[in-house]
Image: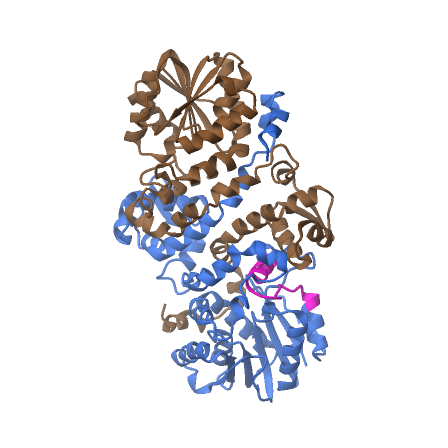
Chain colours: A blue, B brown
Amino acid sequence: MSVETLGRTGDSLNIPAEQQAPTPERIFSAINSYQLTEAIKSAIQLEIFTAVGEGNATSATIAKSCHASERGVRILCDFLTIHGFLTKQEASYFLTADSAVFLDRQSTAYVGSAIEFLLTPRLRECHDRLTEAVRRGGTALGEGMLDPENPDWVKFAQGMMPMMRRSAEIIAAELRREAEAHKVLDVAASHGMFGISVARQNPAAHIYASDWKNVLEVAQKNADAMGVGDRYHLVPGSAFETDFGNGYDLALITNLLHAFDAPACTKLMRKVHIALNAGGRAAIAEFVPNPDRVSPPVAAAFSLTMLAATALGDAYPFTELESIAKAAGFARVDLSPVELGINRLVIAHR
Amino acid sequence: MSVETLGRTGDSLNIPAEQQAPTPERIFSAINSYQLTEAIKSAIQLEIFTAVGEGNATSATIAKSCHASERGVRILCDFLTIHGFLTKQEASYFLTADSAVFLDRQSTAYVGSAIEFLLTPRLRECHDRLTEAVRRGGTALGEGMLDPENPDWVKFAQGMMPMMRRSAEIIAAELRREAEAHKVLDVAASHGMFGISVARQNPAAHIYASDWKNVLEVAQKNADAMGVGDRYHLVPGSAFETDFGNGYDLALITNLLHAFDAPACTKLMRKVHIALNAGGRAAIAEFVPNPDRVSPPVAAAFSLTMLAATALGDAYPFTELESIAKAAGFARVDLSPVELGINRLVIAHR
């Protein structure tokens, strides 16, 4: 902008009018919003929430527990308070409900490990090059996150399991309410939690987990640790190329379709359709925005991740998922009312 | 977290209870909040807001205007809509009040250039190493942003001027309402807007601008372009070391004190006190949090920037600024009620 331009409004300064005018404050905050990412990351790395959960309330005692400086902890905890992840009374900090459940390492629902995947350098770089992605209509980094055997998917399997656990349990219960499944295909199983949850709820179920070989090692470990390893079978390789076998009552396609365009999704769902028994179901867990594509916020915002990190992925409204499943041969597609937080459950009936 | 831990709650799954339980959704969003930084950056770089301001409403026409892909623009514009920087009706996008005033390049109040400083690589790296800064109680990068002649301060002077312009005009008017100033010291003048605004409102005022030599080149250019160059004088060098001279009616200390600890601030304010005439004033524009240090949000959050980017800087509540000014010899210190958006105005009377 030229400095000449500045002169245009300066001479007619009217303070009361200026006071009512919009300020650049929201834009300043939006540009700086990466600071919240860094603050949450630091708080998780330093185990601030765990220290507060143990009863350390002042910056001095939290700092001692976390082997950090008092000044650094005070400023970080104030920042976390501003953003609703702690509360502050006088000079004491306390956990919020969310922080106590999900960010205190002593909680069984601790999800702090999610930063290992969500903030992996390649994903950050994909977003750093968002301008280029908008220009070309897809990731600026080759295949983005979809390189075969990309080790980040091992990080996903390890880091995102806790964040997915609750959804996996709810989905397994909901699917079981409709009908028991005995032979279950878990497509792109990752940590395996979705299939493992089905196996844990139904002792007769056998799970066939498909994913890259390096990722399946994580799934198998989890299956073993959770007591279903003897009913857990591996189908290594790309979901688009591997032979799934057949005779399945249920296929789980969780957080996978968003990585591809509709023709690729249709191709994959056709493979799944063929592998299912008559009467079989495909359960799709996904970010499902409303048709306006701008609500609900978290599901709709996920499209940007796909723009930055994949060639052609997207977050699909239900009608598009329905079209994909029907084009693949499914007879009926339902959007389940169950509440999963970030995801929705779509059930396609063969 | 061990997978064993997962078993503890899984067996007593109760879906209605789970539905009321907190979800990790807010934490997922907080970890991903850097995406808003990248989205705003891309939108500014691609001039999305300018294109929408020109009447391009659909992703197809915006894409054409911005030389970008339709798919990329659609996803980016949806994301900006989710975050309140555009509105969407059917498939058409429109500017919000903030975006029209501050992000459309055709607006005289355009502030998009702020990303050149706010997202400069060194500042991003300071925040990337926040965990280390919390541990040690100050920036992980040497002097952080305060290296002498750091070229980022030229970027600040060039990029942040528009965002500061309105505040500078309001402050100049408020100071003039109390008393005319003829000889004015602008400490760490940067873009020069604070001093230049005083000079523009009072044709008798002479401004003495102190800053690094490379930064003062920007200030002088702005002073020339805004018609006050003949009353603009340069005092190059560190504010802590340069001889300011004396006989000043007014000193401007804008967005500077936050970079230092209280002893250094006191030292600087003592230098300013000596340079002022009897009856002279020091006008301090600052991020001023309430005594709780967690409100108002933007001012209070600024402490984190100082933790990440400086050795000892902070955002000081008014009582601390008052103590600093009184320790430096000032007789009375007032918090002005004028509304500046991000900053507050503190006036110290000699």
Q: In which quarter of the image is residue B210?
A: top left
Q: Is the magenta stretch mostly helix, strand or loop?
A: helix
Can residue B24 be seen by looking at this rendering? no
Specify whether residue A148 is painted magenta.
no
**Left/right of residue A227 with respect to residue B341 in the rendered view:** left
Residue depicted at 43% across the width and 17% down the height: B184
Return the x and y of residue B43 as percentages of the image width and height: 60, 48
Q: In this view, does B151 lie above or below A284?
A: above
Q: In this view, does A240 lie above or below B255?
A: below
Residue depicted at 62% across the width and 45% down the height: B85
For the record, the magenta segment spans A299-320
Return the x and y of residue B23 as percentages of the image width and height: 50, 59
**Left/right of residue B156 with respect to residue B226 in the rendered view:** left
Quarter containing the N terminus of chain B:
bottom left
Residue furthest toward the top? B278
Return the x and y of residue A115 as percentages of the image width and height: 43, 60
**Left/right of residue A344 with respect to residue A106 in the rendered view:** right
Q: In this view, does B166 lie above or below A161?
A: above
Q: Which of B168 and B1 is in front in this view?
A: B168
Q: Nearer the viewer, residue B185 or A248?
A: B185
Can residue B92 be seen by looking at this rendering? yes
Q: Which of B96 and B116 is in front in this view?
A: B116
